[in-house]
């Protein structure tokens, strides 16, 4: 009869002999007591290096705690799934083979989950180390204290990493999808969190995420892989939408935020024929449009890591390039379905302003939020109004999916001034 542990830590392995010992030791050295409470399952995913020797060494040293298995190379999802089938722990974690857990992590997680029996998932704060250091992960903002998040109330507090979470074994009804190379853990963890619509967050526990010097991780190279684009759109975004529609008859705002958070990074990538041919690109854009139609306008606008031009282009794609017909302007603000999507006061950006003796030099740009909107930038100096002359800038090209956005115009102004001179900018629009 297999021993039941408090934790089972499942580690998929591929080409990590340089880091593997440190990863395993971070579990063995846990303050909760390794031999009494923790099981490690090492799954060799056909790794061509000497990782297997390290695994055998630890399996021999801790035969009651460590299981080592091998499989033909089938990907991280298959490795995690095979490892899960051997897990006897009450709580499961899928640890990446080059990352670490802080020494007190398991002890703190176990205490929190015992105190909150109705919580199936506990997420921990991500801290980078190696080539990049710090805890400035984009999704770390929710970790202001140890607490429970209700996803209906805090739909922006999304959790997309499975490796930095602990999950009750009884809550895992569906394993990792093997048809995804990216976002597979997001799909997996999202469906579990949806069951109870709440999960725990521990700011006091850090998942140590290694950033490699050679930038060789799958995430670092995602934008160079075909699998990051059309397959991810179909098997992650559309899969999650279909799942929610069937189970809940709607796509909850929490899931909408996850979909748009992941999509925003793709909007900024300029594509080439090595990534997608014309046929794939056409299908890709069609799928993105369908996904955007399942996401509220407000959630598109709330994304923090894309500029206004990308948000407005996403809205334009969502509304079949008829955005101009759907907006209204009131008090210098653009409204779409009573949501402010752009403030025209933000149309002008001054990038450089220098005063040299009696001359002022100003460099900036003006952003036109809608294709057919006529914005004219003017300025007034010493009571005299002038129009700004725009100039070409070879660095100004912005692409959204495959489309070049020409709604940013650059300008330079040189004016002779007096000590009492005043300069004021204003925008005229039709």
Image (cartoon, rainbow, N blue to C red):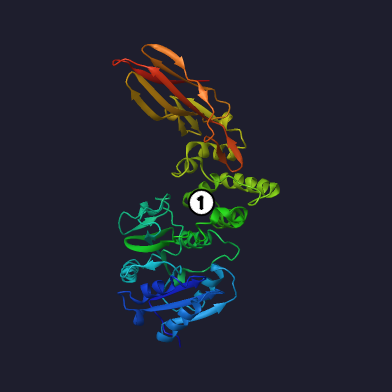
Of residues 172 and 99, the one drawn nearer to the viewer in this rendering = 99
Answer above or below: position of 184 versus 42: above
Determine whether the residue tagged by mark 1 lies in a helix, strand or loop.
helix
Q: Residue at 49% across / 76% down in the picture?
A: 51
Percent x, y for residue 5? 39, 79
Q: Position of residue 138 (x, y in %)?
A: 41, 51
Q: Along the line of sight, which residue is nearer the eye, 272 or 246? A: 272
Residue 130, given in percent of the width and then of the height, sits at 39, 61
Residue 245 in view in this figure: no
- Residue 9 location, quadrant: bottom left
Instruction: Report which quarter residue 332 is drawn in.
Output: top left
Whether residue 100 sits left or right of residue 78 in the image: it is left
Q: Is residue 181 above or below residue 396?
A: below
Q: Residue drawn 34% across and 63% down? A: 206
From this viewpoint, which residue is outermost toward the top? 383
The answer to whether one can see residue 414 in this image is: yes
Residue hosting label 1: 262
Q: For the point 31% across and 68% down, which residue is it?
A: 108
**Mark 1 burial class by Cα count in 10 Å: few <14, some 14-19, many 20+:** some
> Seen from this angle, which residue lies furthest bottom?
1
Apparent side of residue 248 relative to residue 226 in the rendered image (left or right) = left
Q: Nearer the viewer, residue 227 or 411?
A: 411
């Amino acid at each position: 009869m297999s021993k039941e542990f408090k934790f089972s830590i499942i580690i998929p392995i591929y080409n990590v002999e340089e880091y593997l010992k440190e990863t395993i030791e971070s579990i063995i050295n846990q303050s909760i007591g390794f031999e009494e409470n923790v099981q490690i399952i090492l799954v060799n995913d056909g790794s061509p290096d000497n990782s297997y020797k390290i695994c055998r060494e630890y399996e021999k040293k801790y035969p009651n705690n460590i299981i080592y298995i091998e499989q033909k190379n089938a990907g991280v999802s298959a490795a995690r799934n095979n490892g899960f089938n051997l897990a006897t722990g009450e709580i499961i974690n899928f640890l990446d083979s080059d990352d670490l857990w802080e020494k007190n992590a398991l002890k703190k997680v176990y205490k929190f989950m015992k105190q909150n029996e109705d919580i199936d998932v506990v997420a921990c704060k991500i801290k980078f180390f190696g080539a990049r250091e710090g805890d400035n992960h984009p999704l770390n903002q929710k970790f202001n204290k140890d607490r429970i998040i209700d996803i209906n109330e805090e739909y922006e507090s999304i959790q997309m990493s499975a490796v930095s979470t602990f999950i009750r074994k009884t809550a895992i009804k569906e394993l990792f999808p093997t048809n995804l190379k990216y976002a597979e853990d997001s799909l997996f963890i999202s469906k579990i969190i949806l069951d109870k619509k709440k999960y725990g967050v521990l700011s006091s526990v850090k998942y140590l995420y290694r950033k490699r010097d050679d930038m060789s991780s799958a995430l670092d190279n995602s934008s160079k892989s075909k699998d990051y684009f059309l397959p991810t759109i179909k098997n992650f975004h559309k899969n999650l939408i279909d799942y929610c529609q069937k189970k809940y008859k709607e796509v909850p705002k929490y899931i909408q935020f996850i979909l748009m958070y992941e999509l925003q990074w793709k909007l900024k990538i300029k594509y080439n024929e090595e990534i997608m041919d014309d046929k794939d690109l056409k299908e890709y854009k069609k799928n993105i449009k369908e996904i955007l139609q399942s996401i509220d306008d407000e959630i598109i606008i709330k994304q923090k890591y894309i500029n206004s031009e990308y948000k407005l282009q996403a809205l334009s794609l969502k509304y079949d390039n008829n955005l101009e017909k759907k907006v209204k302007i009131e008090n210098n603000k653009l409204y779409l379905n009573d949501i402010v999507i752009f403030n025209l006061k933000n149309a002008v950006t001054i990038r450089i302003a220098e005063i040299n003796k009696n001359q002022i030099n100003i460099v900036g740009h003006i952003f036109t939020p809608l294709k057919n909107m006529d914005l004219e930038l003017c300025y007034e100096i010493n009571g005299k109004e002038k129009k700004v002359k725009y100039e070409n800038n070879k660095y100004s090209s912005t692409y959204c999916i495959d489309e070049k956005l020409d709604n940013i115009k650059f300008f330079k102004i040189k004016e002779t001034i007096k000590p009492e001179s005043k300069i004021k900018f204003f925008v005229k629009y039709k």
